[in-house]
Amino acid sequence: MAQREGIGFLNKRVFYGLGVLIALVVAVGAYFMIADKNAERAASATGEVNAAGEANAAAGVDSSVPLKQAPVIAPDELFLGDAAAKLTVVEYFSLGCPHCQHFHADILPQFKSEFIDTGKVRLVFRDFPLDQPSLAAAMIARCLPGQGYFAMVDTLFAQQGTWHTQNAQGALTNIAKGAGMDQTKLDACLNDKALRDRIVSGIQEAQAKFEVDSTPTFIVGDRKLAGISGYDDFKATIEAQLAKQP
Protein backbone atom coordinates (compact mmCIF):
# COMPACT_ATOMS: atom_id res chain seq x y z
CA MET A 1 0.00 0.00 0.00
CA ALA A 2 1.35 3.47 -0.91
CA GLN A 3 2.26 5.76 1.93
CA ARG A 4 -0.54 8.07 2.99
CA GLU A 5 -0.39 11.84 3.09
CA GLY A 6 0.34 12.98 6.61
CA ILE A 7 -2.55 15.34 7.38
CA GLY A 8 -5.61 15.34 5.20
CA PHE A 9 -7.71 17.66 7.43
CA LEU A 10 -10.94 17.20 5.50
CA ASN A 11 -12.29 14.66 3.05
CA LYS A 12 -11.14 15.98 -0.34
CA ARG A 13 -14.48 15.41 -2.01
CA VAL A 14 -16.16 17.49 0.70
CA PHE A 15 -13.34 19.98 1.08
CA TYR A 16 -13.74 21.29 -2.44
CA GLY A 17 -17.51 21.58 -2.41
CA LEU A 18 -19.15 24.96 -2.57
CA GLY A 19 -19.96 25.10 1.12
CA VAL A 20 -16.32 24.68 2.12
CA LEU A 21 -15.19 27.67 0.08
CA ILE A 22 -16.51 29.94 2.82
CA ALA A 23 -14.67 27.92 5.44
CA LEU A 24 -11.56 28.06 3.29
CA VAL A 25 -11.62 31.86 3.16
CA VAL A 26 -11.96 32.06 6.93
CA ALA A 27 -9.34 29.41 7.60
CA VAL A 28 -6.68 30.85 5.33
CA GLY A 29 -7.42 34.39 6.42
CA ALA A 30 -6.61 33.23 9.91
CA TYR A 31 -3.68 31.29 8.39
CA PHE A 32 -3.17 27.67 9.26
CA MET A 33 -6.21 26.61 11.32
CA ILE A 34 -6.05 22.81 11.46
CA ALA A 35 -9.01 20.45 11.48
CA ASP A 36 -8.37 16.75 12.04
CA LYS A 37 -11.84 15.36 11.27
CA ASN A 38 -11.92 12.84 8.40
CA ALA A 39 -8.10 12.97 7.93
CA GLU A 40 -7.76 9.23 7.47
CA ARG A 41 -10.53 9.13 4.88
CA ALA A 42 -8.90 11.86 2.78
CA ALA A 43 -5.46 10.26 2.98
CA SER A 44 -6.92 6.87 2.10
CA ALA A 45 -8.47 8.17 -1.12
CA THR A 46 -5.09 9.38 -2.38
CA GLY A 47 -3.34 6.22 -1.23
CA GLU A 48 -5.77 3.90 -2.99
CA VAL A 49 -5.54 5.72 -6.32
CA ASN A 50 -1.74 5.84 -6.22
CA ALA A 51 -1.55 2.18 -5.20
CA ALA A 52 -3.69 1.20 -8.18
CA GLY A 53 -1.47 3.17 -10.54
CA GLU A 54 1.67 1.63 -9.07
CA ALA A 55 0.27 -1.89 -9.45
CA ASN A 56 -0.45 -1.30 -13.13
CA ALA A 57 2.98 0.23 -13.67
CA ALA A 58 4.67 -2.73 -11.98
CA ALA A 59 2.89 -5.01 -14.44
CA GLY A 60 4.18 -2.97 -17.38
CA VAL A 61 0.74 -1.58 -18.21
CA ASP A 62 0.11 2.02 -19.20
CA SER A 63 -2.32 3.09 -16.48
CA SER A 64 -3.27 6.38 -18.15
CA VAL A 65 -6.87 6.82 -19.27
CA PRO A 66 -8.30 8.89 -22.14
CA LEU A 67 -9.88 12.28 -21.58
CA LYS A 68 -12.49 14.06 -23.63
CA GLN A 69 -10.31 17.15 -23.83
CA ALA A 70 -6.78 18.33 -23.18
CA PRO A 71 -6.14 21.26 -20.81
CA VAL A 72 -5.92 24.76 -22.21
CA ILE A 73 -2.68 26.35 -21.03
CA ALA A 74 -3.02 30.03 -20.11
CA PRO A 75 -0.21 32.43 -21.10
CA ASP A 76 0.64 33.21 -17.46
CA GLU A 77 0.96 29.60 -16.25
CA LEU A 78 4.27 28.48 -14.76
CA PHE A 79 6.08 25.64 -16.50
CA LEU A 80 9.44 24.03 -17.11
CA GLY A 81 10.59 23.61 -20.70
CA ASP A 82 9.92 25.07 -24.11
CA ALA A 83 6.49 26.58 -24.76
CA ALA A 84 6.70 25.09 -28.26
CA ALA A 85 7.44 21.55 -27.04
CA LYS A 86 5.63 18.72 -28.89
CA LEU A 87 3.93 17.45 -25.72
CA THR A 88 2.50 19.28 -22.71
CA VAL A 89 2.26 17.52 -19.37
CA VAL A 90 0.21 19.14 -16.60
CA GLU A 91 0.94 18.10 -13.02
CA TYR A 92 -1.72 18.60 -10.34
CA PHE A 93 0.12 18.42 -7.04
CA SER A 94 -0.15 19.18 -3.34
CA LEU A 95 3.00 20.41 -1.61
CA GLY A 96 2.15 18.34 1.47
CA CYS A 97 1.71 15.10 -0.50
CA PRO A 98 4.53 12.52 -0.06
CA HIS A 99 3.75 10.99 -3.47
CA CYS A 100 4.31 14.42 -5.05
CA GLN A 101 7.53 14.84 -3.07
CA HIS A 102 8.68 11.47 -4.40
CA PHE A 103 8.03 12.58 -7.99
CA HIS A 104 9.85 15.89 -7.61
CA ALA A 105 12.83 14.40 -5.77
CA ASP A 106 13.27 11.04 -7.49
CA ILE A 107 11.63 11.20 -10.92
CA LEU A 108 11.57 14.81 -12.12
CA PRO A 109 15.38 15.26 -12.36
CA GLN A 110 15.75 12.44 -14.90
CA PHE A 111 12.51 13.39 -16.67
CA LYS A 112 13.77 16.96 -16.95
CA SER A 113 17.14 15.87 -18.35
CA GLU A 114 15.72 13.48 -20.93
CA PHE A 115 12.53 15.19 -22.04
CA ILE A 116 12.24 18.79 -20.79
CA ASP A 117 15.77 20.07 -21.36
CA THR A 118 15.79 18.49 -24.82
CA GLY A 119 12.71 20.49 -25.86
CA LYS A 120 10.37 17.51 -26.24
CA VAL A 121 8.06 18.17 -23.27
CA ARG A 122 6.98 21.07 -21.12
CA LEU A 123 5.73 20.48 -17.58
CA VAL A 124 3.03 22.83 -16.31
CA PHE A 125 2.63 23.19 -12.53
CA ARG A 126 -0.94 23.38 -11.17
CA ASP A 127 -1.86 23.44 -7.49
CA PHE A 128 -4.26 20.94 -5.97
CA PRO A 129 -3.70 21.44 -2.21
CA LEU A 130 -5.25 18.73 -0.05
CA ASP A 131 -5.24 20.63 3.26
CA GLN A 132 -4.77 24.06 4.82
CA PRO A 133 -0.97 23.99 5.25
CA SER A 134 -0.57 22.84 1.63
CA LEU A 135 -2.81 25.67 0.44
CA ALA A 136 -0.77 28.20 2.44
CA ALA A 137 2.46 26.74 1.06
CA ALA A 138 1.11 26.99 -2.50
CA MET A 139 0.18 30.62 -1.96
CA ILE A 140 3.64 31.44 -0.59
CA ALA A 141 5.31 29.84 -3.60
CA ARG A 142 3.00 31.69 -6.02
CA CYS A 143 3.92 35.00 -4.38
CA LEU A 144 7.56 34.65 -5.41
CA PRO A 145 8.48 35.94 -8.87
CA GLY A 146 10.14 34.08 -11.72
CA GLN A 147 12.57 31.35 -10.77
CA GLY A 148 11.86 32.10 -7.13
CA TYR A 149 8.66 30.08 -7.53
CA PHE A 150 10.43 26.92 -8.66
CA ALA A 151 13.11 27.34 -6.00
CA MET A 152 10.40 27.61 -3.33
CA VAL A 153 8.60 24.51 -4.61
CA ASP A 154 11.89 22.62 -4.36
CA THR A 155 12.47 23.94 -0.83
CA LEU A 156 8.96 23.10 0.36
CA PHE A 157 9.22 19.55 -0.94
CA ALA A 158 12.70 19.12 0.55
CA GLN A 159 11.47 20.37 3.94
CA GLN A 160 8.02 18.78 3.78
CA GLY A 161 8.52 16.89 7.03
CA THR A 162 9.33 20.16 8.80
CA TRP A 163 6.33 22.29 7.84
CA HIS A 164 3.61 19.74 7.01
CA THR A 165 2.93 19.23 10.70
CA GLN A 166 0.79 20.66 13.50
CA ASN A 167 3.22 23.60 13.62
CA ALA A 168 2.71 24.61 10.00
CA GLN A 169 2.43 28.33 10.71
CA GLY A 170 5.79 28.77 12.38
CA ALA A 171 7.68 26.51 9.98
CA LEU A 172 6.20 28.05 6.82
CA THR A 173 6.88 31.53 8.16
CA ASN A 174 10.54 30.66 8.66
CA ILE A 175 10.82 29.16 5.18
CA ALA A 176 9.18 32.21 3.59
CA LYS A 177 11.47 34.60 5.43
CA GLY A 178 14.45 32.51 4.38
CA ALA A 179 13.42 33.18 0.78
CA GLY A 180 13.40 36.92 1.40
CA MET A 181 9.76 37.55 2.31
CA ASP A 182 9.37 39.87 5.28
CA GLN A 183 6.33 39.69 7.55
CA THR A 184 4.49 42.42 5.64
CA LYS A 185 4.87 40.58 2.32
CA LEU A 186 3.94 37.27 3.92
CA ASP A 187 0.79 38.74 5.45
CA ALA A 188 -0.19 40.28 2.11
CA CYS A 189 0.43 36.99 0.33
CA LEU A 190 -1.64 34.85 2.67
CA ASN A 191 -4.49 37.37 2.66
CA ASP A 192 -4.52 37.67 -1.15
CA LYS A 193 -8.11 36.73 -1.93
CA ALA A 194 -7.58 36.82 -5.70
CA LEU A 195 -4.72 34.33 -5.44
CA ARG A 196 -6.68 32.07 -3.09
CA ASP A 197 -9.72 32.15 -5.36
CA ARG A 198 -7.57 31.35 -8.40
CA ILE A 199 -6.19 28.23 -6.71
CA VAL A 200 -9.68 27.13 -5.63
CA SER A 201 -11.03 27.72 -9.15
CA GLY A 202 -8.20 25.60 -10.53
CA ILE A 203 -9.17 22.78 -8.18
CA GLN A 204 -12.80 22.98 -9.26
CA GLU A 205 -11.83 22.94 -12.94
CA ALA A 206 -9.55 19.93 -12.39
CA GLN A 207 -12.36 18.00 -10.78
CA ALA A 208 -15.06 19.00 -13.26
CA LYS A 209 -13.08 18.62 -16.50
CA PHE A 210 -10.49 15.97 -15.71
CA GLU A 211 -11.91 14.15 -12.65
CA VAL A 212 -8.78 14.81 -10.61
CA ASP A 213 -9.24 13.49 -7.07
CA SER A 214 -5.73 12.56 -5.93
CA THR A 215 -2.17 13.83 -6.15
CA PRO A 216 -0.05 13.74 -8.11
CA THR A 217 -2.23 13.49 -11.20
CA PHE A 218 -0.72 14.12 -14.62
CA ILE A 219 -2.52 15.15 -17.77
CA VAL A 220 -0.29 13.86 -20.56
CA GLY A 221 -1.61 15.32 -23.78
CA ASP A 222 -5.21 14.09 -23.75
CA ARG A 223 -4.73 11.29 -21.19
CA LYS A 224 -4.78 11.20 -17.40
CA LEU A 225 -2.24 9.37 -15.26
CA ALA A 226 -2.83 9.05 -11.52
CA GLY A 227 -0.28 7.20 -9.42
CA ILE A 228 3.30 6.44 -10.47
CA SER A 229 5.98 4.39 -8.78
CA GLY A 230 9.15 4.97 -10.77
CA TYR A 231 10.75 6.77 -13.68
CA ASP A 232 10.52 3.91 -16.20
CA ASP A 233 6.75 3.65 -15.70
CA PHE A 234 6.28 7.39 -16.15
CA LYS A 235 8.61 7.41 -19.16
CA ALA A 236 6.54 4.73 -20.91
CA THR A 237 3.43 6.91 -20.81
CA ILE A 238 5.37 9.97 -22.00
CA GLU A 239 6.95 8.13 -24.93
CA ALA A 240 3.62 6.64 -25.99
CA GLN A 241 2.07 10.10 -26.19
CA LEU A 242 5.10 11.65 -27.89
CA ALA A 243 4.83 9.00 -30.59
CA LYS A 244 1.32 10.24 -31.39
CA GLN A 245 2.37 13.87 -31.85
CA PRO A 246 2.75 15.24 -35.40
Image (cartoon, grey):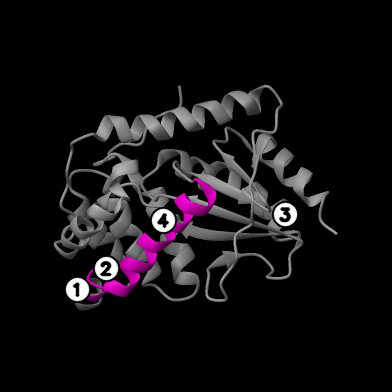
Q: Residues within 10 Å of mark 3 (few under 14, many from 20)?
A: many
Amino acid residing under circle 1: Gln
Q: Which residue is mark 2?
A: 177
Q: Nearer the viewer, residue 160 or 209?
A: 209
Q: Contact (CB < 8 A) between labels 1 and 2?
A: yes
- From the top left corner, tell me how far across and down residue 151 is, in percent: 46, 63
Q: Contact (CB < 8 A) between labels 3 and 2?
A: no
Quarter of the image for the C terminus: give it. bottom right
- Tell me how far mark 4 sits from mark 2, CA to CA: 27 Å
- Tell me how far mark 3 sits from mark 2, CA to CA: 34 Å
Q: Which residue is mark 3?
A: 115
Q: Which residue is mark 1?
A: 183
Amino acid residing under circle 4: Ile
- Of callouts 1 and 2, which one flags the residue occurring earlier in the amino acid sequence? 2
Asked if one can make out residue 18 in the rendered structure from this viewpoint, the answer is yes
Q: Is residue 203 magenta?
A: yes
- In the picture, residue 22 is in which quadrant? bottom left
Q: Contact (CB < 8 A) between labels 1 and 4?
A: no
Q: Which residues are magenta?
A: 187-211
